[in-house]
Image (cartoon, rainbow, N blue to C red):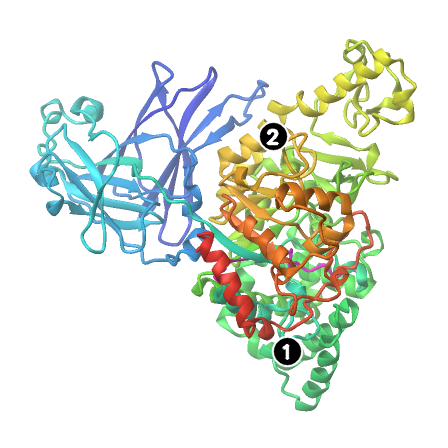
């Protein structure tokens, strides 16, 4: 087969355009290779290659590369940019054909969210049937992306030649949908002459026609594409005996996309309550909250992390961001109602215990974990043979072996030798596969229990996720920024992390002294060596259940607040990576070097970082006025200007790999000390920002103005790290008074207690913001109804970040069935959501 590639792309000096080509064989294997293109002017890149097909299909994308800075022999070129490749360029591979690919570089489209699982689920076009396209001996293949279509609309092609309908839309050629939002059609080259003009039109269910905007599209001239054909065939596409395909990939149809807006709720899974819960919300309860979301017109449910956190089996394990595995699900979320024991007497005993736990106002984490584990061990003894012989079980084990095997060994070691403390565990090769496999062989049955439980959890969550999708509700997951130092990953893959460092956050509104999360920081150089495979596997696992996800502390992909592992305070941290300052540079600001004002760089001992939050402290006041001013200038330059391009480049190396790993809608938690580069990078990549009115991003504002929220954002009132709306109202009367008078625009004194009608007004304001997603906590939704809401508002607080021993135990004070029966509230919520055009 012969492949002709042609694309326009203005490169910088030292950059090249390459094609990343992949053949897909019938056995599911992928065969990759790179093809370099050539240019005479740095704009028009071309290449002609003859090769043998290594599969039945092929796909390709363009990448931008540059040579490494060092001249080491064999060092790989750097990939500095990739095309947006959510909808791949896919073609049948045939050695007898010649292919002409005339392309345009594909940036992340403005409506990229319409290609995500979240959009597909909420709008009811999840997993529509996909057609395939037959080719003629000589074929013009047209491809167009049309994410703007409504249900029932289709795309057609019309042009200036008889075989294109002569501009008559009644004779327009119907296209077929081949991928998400992609439409294509093949036309025989025997009846089409070059050059020609054409356009795409949208045909509605009642045969209404919408023409795409802009000028007519132009086919390439014969000279542009036919360099590989004999001269006598270069002017008439119908001539020649060879088999060829001329592919015209036209980007997006030129039509405006209406804004898609959705409302949803935010609730930890452990907080759900039904009459049958076993003391904690579970995967079965998830279906019930989906039903309530449907009743009220919501299309999204956001959860906190649901991974296994069992380390000490104490209250500290309730912290959902300290998982022992980034893949394994928490056994506490198993719905035991779906897993009845054969022993009726034992089953009745467990039911009595879980009913007592379910009657408690809050989660008793320790007792619930104990109950679930006892139950699951008995279930394993009863059903291991029948379950483990299922084809679905064997498939699950095979597809997830890479993480299941070390996880199951880790759990057995934990339960045999106690809390994860690797130095006290028996010596086991953690860097190769054989050590884990030998352990599994030795303790096969005991280790298999953990695999058995993960299979059951996967089955239940997948079922709940499919149930939600079927009801046009998507689940939004949470991607924690760190991994636990006592996790499978830290034990089995320590080379991917800086185990002597801890991640955290500098001082902010959540914690005046900063936060030390205790998570080891990532070794990004190691992770990049295989194209961030660790992250891709993590996200592809999440995508089985979730259609969207929140990147916890997205700033960590630009830079992380890194603290020496044993440091007593987060104030001694520094951003990493960073561009530290030499003493000479420091003194160039008109400031004498003072070691109390600076922190030594972790990698360059002769360079320094200004100490965070030192302005206004004693050592700063001890300086002469001129040096105080000099330090402020240095401080502002270092933290808010110096690193903008540098940190943007760091994020652009990492985040595109995450986005390419799935079709989930990506949202970033961009709160705190946010560099200027964060917003532009998130906008370029199509990542939704987080907007909280009480945490304005414009300097000098007390409250953000909701009407200025960017469309590509998530609006919420408060997060799980903050008080609920009613608690916030009482925390600071002076602040509340300002909000009451200036934001709500009410005269007089603010009421001491937040009434239901005021809660409804505040919720309505947020729903009517321009933000794509408006996701409000369950507590704040319920605050509207004074009869239904929890009289003990303090019990609704989920987390206090300044408290490292916070107990995550909030549960709904009433069962979901009572929400479903609350007709008045549900009708009010549905009306609020409908009026805000979030449907």
Circle 2: is it few (<14), some (14-19), or many (20+) Cα within 10 Å?
Answer: some
| 366 shown above or below 130 | below
What's drawn in magenta, residue-wise? 297-311
Mark seen at residue 650:
2
Q: Residue at x 20, y 28 (%)?
A: 218
Seen at 82% across and 26% down, the residue is 611
Tell me if residue 96 can be seen.
no
Cβ atoms under marks 1 and 2 closer than 8 Å: no
Q: Which residue is mark 1?
A: 275
Categorize mark 1 by other alpha carbons within 10 Å: few (<14), some (14-19), many (20+): some
Q: Nearer the viewer, residue 735 or 197?
A: 735
Relative to 311, residue 815 above or below: below
Q: Quadrant of the N terminus?
A: top left
Q: Is residue 31 magenta?
A: no
Q: Quadrant of the C terminus?
A: bottom left
Residue 180 left/right relative to 357: left
Please tell me in which quadrant of the rendered image residue 166 appears: top left
Q: Report the front residue among 500 and 26.
A: 500
Secondary element at tag 1: loop
Residue drawn at x 62%, y 70% as measured from the top left: 452
Q: Quadrant of residue 113?
A: top left
> In the rendered image, which quarter is residue 383 located in?
bottom right
Q: Is residue 719 above or below residue 281?
A: above
């Amino acid at each position: 087969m012969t492949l002709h590639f042609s694309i326009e792309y203005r490169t910088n000096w030292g950059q090249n355009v390459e094609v990343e080509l992949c053949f897909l064989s019938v056995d599911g294997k992928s065969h990759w290779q790179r093809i370099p293109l050539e240019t005479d002017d740095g704009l028009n890149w071309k290449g002609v290659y003859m090769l043998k097909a290594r599969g039945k299909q092929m796909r390709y994308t363009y990448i931008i590369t540059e040579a490494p800075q060092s001249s080491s022999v064999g060092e790989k070129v750097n990939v500095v940019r990739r095309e947006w490749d959510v909808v791949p360029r896919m073609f049948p591979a045939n050695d007898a054909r010649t292919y002409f690919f005339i392309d345009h570089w594909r940036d992340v489209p403005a409506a990229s969210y319409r290609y995500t699982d979240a959009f597909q689920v909420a709008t009811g076009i999840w997993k529509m049937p996909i057609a395939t396209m037959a080719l003629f001996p000589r074929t013009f293949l047209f491809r167009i992306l049309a994410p703007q279509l409504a249900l029932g609309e289709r795309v057609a092609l019309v042009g200036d030649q008889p075989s294109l309908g002569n501009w008559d839309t009644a004779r327009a050629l119907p296209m077929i949908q081949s991928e998400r939002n992609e439409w294509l059609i093949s036309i025989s080259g025997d009846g089409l002459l070059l050059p020609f003009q054409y356009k795409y039109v949208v045909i509605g269910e009642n045969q209404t026609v919408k023409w795409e905007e802009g000028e007519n599209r132009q086919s390439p001239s014969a000279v542009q594409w036919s360099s590989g054909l004999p001269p006598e065939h270069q002017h008439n596409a119908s001539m020649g005996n060879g088999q060829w395909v001329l592919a015209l990939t036209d980007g997006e149809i030129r039509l405006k996309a209406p804004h898609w807006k959705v409302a949803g709720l935010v609730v930890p899974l452990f907080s759900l309550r039904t009459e049958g819960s076993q003391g904690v919300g579970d995967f079965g309860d998830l279906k019930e909250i989906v039903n309530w979301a449907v009743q009220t017109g919501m299309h999204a449910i956001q959860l906190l992390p649901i991974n296994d956190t069992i380390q000490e089996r104490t209250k500290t394990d309730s912290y959902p961001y300290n998982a022992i595995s980034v893949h394994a699900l928490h056994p506490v979320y198993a719905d035991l109602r779906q897993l009845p024991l054969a022993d009726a007497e034992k089953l009745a005993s467990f039911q009595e215990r879980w009913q007592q736990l379910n009657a408690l106002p809050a989660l008793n984490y320790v007792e619930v974990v104990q109950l679930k584990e006892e139950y699951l061990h008995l279930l394993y003894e009863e059903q291991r043979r029948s379950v483990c012989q299922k084809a679905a079980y064997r498939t699950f084990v095979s597809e997830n072996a890479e993480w299941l095997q070390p996880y199951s060994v880790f759990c057995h070691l934990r339960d045999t030798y106690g809390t994860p403390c690797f130095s006290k565990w028996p010596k086991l090769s953690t860097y190769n596969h054989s050590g884990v496999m030998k352990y599994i062989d030795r303790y096969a049955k005991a280790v298999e229990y953990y695999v058995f439980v993960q299979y059951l959890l996967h089955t239940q969550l997948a079922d709940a996720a499919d149930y939600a999708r079927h009801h046009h509700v998507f689940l939004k997951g949470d991607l924690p920024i760190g991994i636990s130092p006592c996790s499978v990953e830290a034990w089995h893959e320590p080379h991917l992390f800086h185990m002597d460092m801890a991640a955290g956050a500098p001082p902010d509104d959540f914690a005046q002294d900063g936060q030390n999360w205790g998570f080891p920081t990532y070794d990004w150089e190691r992770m990049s060596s295989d194209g961030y495979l660790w992250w891709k596997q993590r996200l592809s696992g999440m995508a089985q259940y979730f259609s969207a996800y929140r990147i916890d502390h997205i700033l960590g992909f630009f830079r992380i607040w890194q603290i020496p592992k044993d440091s007593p305070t987060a104030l001694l941290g520094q951003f990493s990576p960073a561009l530290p300052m030499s003493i000479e540079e420091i003194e160039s600001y008109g400031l004498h070097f003072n070691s109390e004002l600076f922190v030594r760089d972790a990698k360059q001992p002769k360079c320094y970082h200004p100490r965070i939050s030192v302005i206004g402290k004693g050592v700063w006041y001890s300086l002469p006025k001129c040096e105080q001013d000099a330090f402020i200038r240095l401080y502002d330059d270092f933290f808010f200007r110096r690193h903008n391009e540098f940190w943007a480049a760091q994020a652009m190396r990492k985040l595109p790999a995450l986005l390419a790993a799935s079709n989930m809608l990506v949202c970033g938690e961009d709160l705190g000390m946010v560099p200027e580069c964060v917003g532009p990078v998130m906008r370029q990549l199509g990542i939704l920002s987080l907007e909280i009115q009480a945490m304005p991003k414009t300097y000098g504002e007390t409250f953000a103005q909701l009407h200025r929220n960017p469309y590509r954002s998530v609006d919420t009132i408060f997060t799980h790290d903050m008080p609920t709306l009613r608690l916030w109202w009482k925390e600071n009367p002076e602040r509340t008074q300002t909000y009451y008078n200036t934001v709500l625009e009410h005269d007089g004194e603010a009421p001491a207690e937040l009434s239901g009608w005021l809660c409804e007004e505040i919720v309505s304001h947020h729903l009517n913001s321009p933000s794509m997603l408006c996701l409000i906590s369950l507590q704040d939704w319920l605050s509207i109804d004074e009869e239904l809401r929890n009289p003990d508002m303090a019990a609704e607080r989920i987390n206090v970040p300044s408290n490292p021993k916070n107990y995550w135990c909030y549960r709904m004070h009433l069962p979901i069935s009572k929400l479903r029966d609350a007709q008045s509230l549900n009708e009010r919520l549905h009306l609020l959501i409908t009026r805000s055009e979030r449907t």
